[in-house]
Every structure is written in structure tokens, then in C-alpha cells.
Image (cartoon, grey):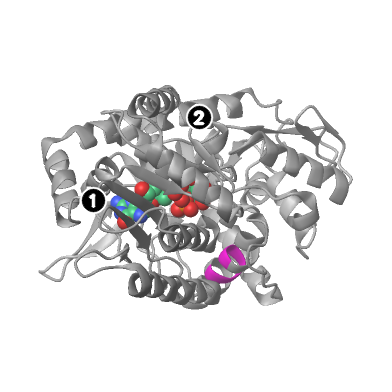
Amino acid sequence: MPSSQHGKTFDLVIAANRLPVDQVILDSGETEWRRSPGGLVTAMDSVMRDQPGAWVGWAGEPGEAPAPFDQEGTHLVPVALSAEEVRRYYEGFSNDTLWPIYHDVIVPASFHREWWTAYQRVNERFAEAVAEVAAPGARIWVQDYQLQLVPAMVRALRPDVRIGWFNHIPFPPVELFAQLPWRGQLLRGLLGADFLGFQRQADAQNFVRACRQLIHAETKAGTVAVDDGSGRRVRAAAIPISIDFKGLEALAREPSVGERAAEIREQLGNPKVLMLGVDRLDYTKGIRHRLKAYEELLADRRIGPPDVTLVQVATPSRERVAAYQHLRADVEQTVGRINGDLGQIGAPAVHYLHHAYPREEMAALFRAADVMLVTPLRDGMNLVAKEYVTCRFDLGGALVLSEFTGAWHELHQAFSCNPHDIEGLKQTILRAINTPEREKQRIMRALRKRVSDHDVQRWAARFLAALDAAPDRAEPNP
Ligand code: GDG
């Protein structure tokens, strides 16, 4: 039952692995919470404007959770994770079991029963926190692969609420999903929801097929029947995520951002062609394939410094997971070799930056880049592709985009590539460089229209409308 007698309850409750704030330690030694600038936060702003909501998530540091607090109109409910739970639930099960399985097993997945136990325990804690702050009949929106058991756990505690879940990453084909020793529990966890949102139609279909084949559920027209005697059907559909087009374009139009873009080109020696990659340093992003194609183009003397240079921003990510440590070593060795073999004094072939930058700097880089290389081997959506075209209000630049991203299904006018096909990728990069300006402008206009018409505010509104329209829930238990 709702525990409104103990505290405030809300008609909309978000549950995500992380809270939308970061703790900052000031010079004075005091700590302060700052809003993190992610797209999800912006999307939620648009839906929480008219109705206050709560957000349940981890505050980012292991140990005791801070007390719930209000920030910019949202009630934040921190969930505690011990250091061991961070290792087992987050780095382990989420990022070393589920992440590789859901991304085509680009690296092998690790299965450990104690990671699974921690995943269950943490999901239960999230579900309890959600049940505490949800008003009667509230809408609950659970985010992502770290919380796949939460829908069923919340339903058990609070049969009166309406539950949605959105998967930010791909949902794998049944042949890969079937490897998971806990596949049945994961599917049943998700089937606690009323509506399940995915990035692509294919992801929703993979989920439905997994239910049919692995737990023998009856499925029909994008819905799955739940065999708990309630007669409930769960709908699965594609609601692709997007970005805050208006907000980012306004930032990109700032004169200071334009000046910084010119300064970046100047500092790079005013190359004729500036290529750019921006990714979390993750093996799904195809950074190695991109570097290989670039290295070969340089070695073949098709392009070369000082006329052409590549800036690769690789934001540090999951640094305690072994596969990420290997990737970093490999990428850094490759960059060193390319610069050693093919760079010149004052004109390195690759500018490799293992940092996170402020949004203004990212917008300036996007404005400065002639060719944006987005070459993942698998990516749920890839927001960088959408951000790049958003920043190009001047219609300049060219987007090279992998077919294996969710974004490609919306932005297929881009210079498409299969990153596994190194020869094809090289040809695509050359085409992106050499296509006449007018044609590139035509393409950029079409890409921008798509993102501007389908922004993150529309995504959030569509998700909640789909949640409201999902097949009726069963009558709550008396
Ligand atoms: C997951 C899915 C899906 C990166 N470096 C910096 C920085 N970024 C920003 C980018 C972009 C975001 O981080 C990364 O988003 P992506 O979509 O590219 O990738 P994932 O982190 O893997 O996200 C993905 C997404 O969820 C949303 O559903 O698209 O498929 O894997 O916004 O700009 N931002 C700043 N400094 C950096 O150094 N400020």
C-alpha cells in the first residue's frame, strides 16, 4: 500500500541506476548537488513541468545513501549501494554480463552467480524505494538494463500503479539472450510492466520472440500474455530516444562556441579536413575499426597530415572492468603507432583525448568537424550522431554513420557504413570528404529535420502516452 502517511508521494516516479545529480565538493569543503547535463534529465524536465515527480537512483558513491531531498522541483530518493554491490551489481552483472550479451557479444560475457544475487538484491531495493514514494495509481517509469527485475517487483508491492520500462541499449536476438542462465527471471521481471519501450522495432521483436521461445508465452501483435492468471498483456514497441534539439542548437549558435570552433581549427594547424570521433571509451563504439580504416587511408597516401587530421575524444568509462582496460591499452597503442609511423612534426595524425569536456567544448568540436565518424559495432541509439547534426545549423559537415546504431534507422541519408568492412569504411570516409558541398548540405538539411521533428521532449511524451494506452491492467488485489 502507498505509504503516504510516512512521507510525500508522487504521480510520476522515475527509477534509474543514477540520480540526475552529481555531488561536487566545494573549496570550502562543503558538498553540493549539481544537476548532471544528460538528455534524460532534460526529457524529464519537459514532463515534470506540469506535475512534480520523484526520481529514485544511486547517488554515485558507495556506502550509506544521503537522505531524500528536493532539487529543482524533483524529489530525489537516493538508493544505497555498498562497495561490493557496485562491483557485483553494477560493474559485474550490469556491465560485464548484460552489456556484452545485449551488444552482440563483441567481447565474451562473464557469468557469476554472486553477481546475479547482488543484481536481484539491488533491484529489490529500488523497487521498495519506488513503492514508498508512488501515489495511488501513479505512473512508474523504470530506465534501462540495470533494473530489469524492478517492474515485477514493483507490481508485487503495488498492484495499483502503472509501470513502464525503457531499454536504452539493444535487446539481443534470442540466440544470444538464451545464453543467460537467468533468462527466464529477466523476462518475467520485465513482464511485470504494462509497457516496454525499445530503441528499434527489431529490439521489441527480439524481446517478444524471447518470451515466446524461452518461457513459452503466448504472443500477438507486439504483445505478450502474462501467465499469472491475471489475463494481463504487456505491449512492447519502439520509441526511439532523442536529444534536446532546441537547447543544443541554441548553445551551438552562441558566438563564443563559434569562436572556439575557429580556434580549435587554428590550433590544429587549419587542416583542410578535420575528422572527429566522440565516444565513451567502449568496445561497442567501433573505435578500433575506425582507427584501422584511418590508418590504412594514411598508409595508402589517400589522405594525410597536415591536410587531414583526426580528433578522437574517448571519454573515460567503466575503468575497473577488464575488457575496458584492454580496450584502452589497445586504442592507445594504435594511436601511438599511427602517430609514430604517419604523423609529422607539428601535425600528428590523431589527436587522442582521454577526457570528459564541458558541453560548450563538445558543441564547438561538432561545429569545427568536417567529417563526424560514428562507427559503432552495436549501439542502442547513439546520441552523438544526433548532436552533431543538431550543431550544424550552417548545414556544413558530413556524418559517417554505422548501420548498427539505432540512430541509423532514423538518419539513413547519412554516409552509411558497415564498420566491419574496413575497405567499405575507407571508401565511405573518402566519399564523405569528397562529395560536393551542395549535396552534403542537402543531406544535412534532411538529417536535421528528422532530429528537430523528433526531439527528446517528444520521446518522453510519446513514451508516457504509450504507457497510458497500454492494455488495461488487471484489477488491483483487494
Ligand atoms: C546509452 C546507449 C543510447 C560523451 N563524452 C562527453 C559527453 N558525452 C555525451 C555525448 C552523448 C552521451 O555522452 C553519450 O551518448 P551515446 O548515445 O552516444 O552513448 P551511451 O553513453 O553508450 O548511451 C546509447 C543512449 O544510452 C541514450 O539512450 O543512445 O545507444 O549505449 O550525449 O555527447 N558529454 C560531455 N563531455 C564529454 O566529454 N559534456
Quadrant assignment, res 111: bottom right
Decide which of 430, 127 is in the foreground and name it: 430
Residue 364: tell me if it is visible.
yes
Q: x, y (%) of residue 243?
A: 40, 36
Q: x, y (%) of residue 107?
A: 63, 67
Side of 140 relative to 338 (left or right): right
Point 27% across, 32% down: residue: 249
Mark 2 crowdedness (10 Å alpha carbons): few <14, some 14-19, many ≥20 = some
Give the CA separation, mark 2 to mark 1: 26 Å
Side of 157 relative to 16 (left or right): right
Decide which of 225, 140 is in the foreground and name it: 225
Point 11% across, 69% down: residue: 27
- The quadrant of the rendering that contains the N terminus is top right
Name the residue beneath numbered marker 1: 271
Side of 361 relative to 78 (left or right): left
Decide which of 418, 477 is in the foreground and name it: 418
Residue interval drawn in magenta = 91-95
What is the secondary structure assignment of the residue under circle 1? Answer: loop
* Residue type, label 1: Pro
Secondary structure mostly seen in the magenta stretch: helix
Residue 413 marker: 2
Residue 375: tell me if it is visible.
no
In the image as oriented, which residue stretches furthest toward the front? 301
* Residue type, label 2: Gln
Q: x, y (%) of residue 246?
A: 30, 28
**Residue contact between numbered discs 2 and 1, judged by CB atoms under 8 Å:** no
Decide which of 265, 116 is in the foreground and name it: 265
Quadrant assignment, res 9: top left
Residue behind label 1 places its C-beta within 8 angstroms of ligand 1: no
Point 53% across, 66% down: residue: 90
What is the secondary structure assignment of the residue under circle 2? Answer: loop
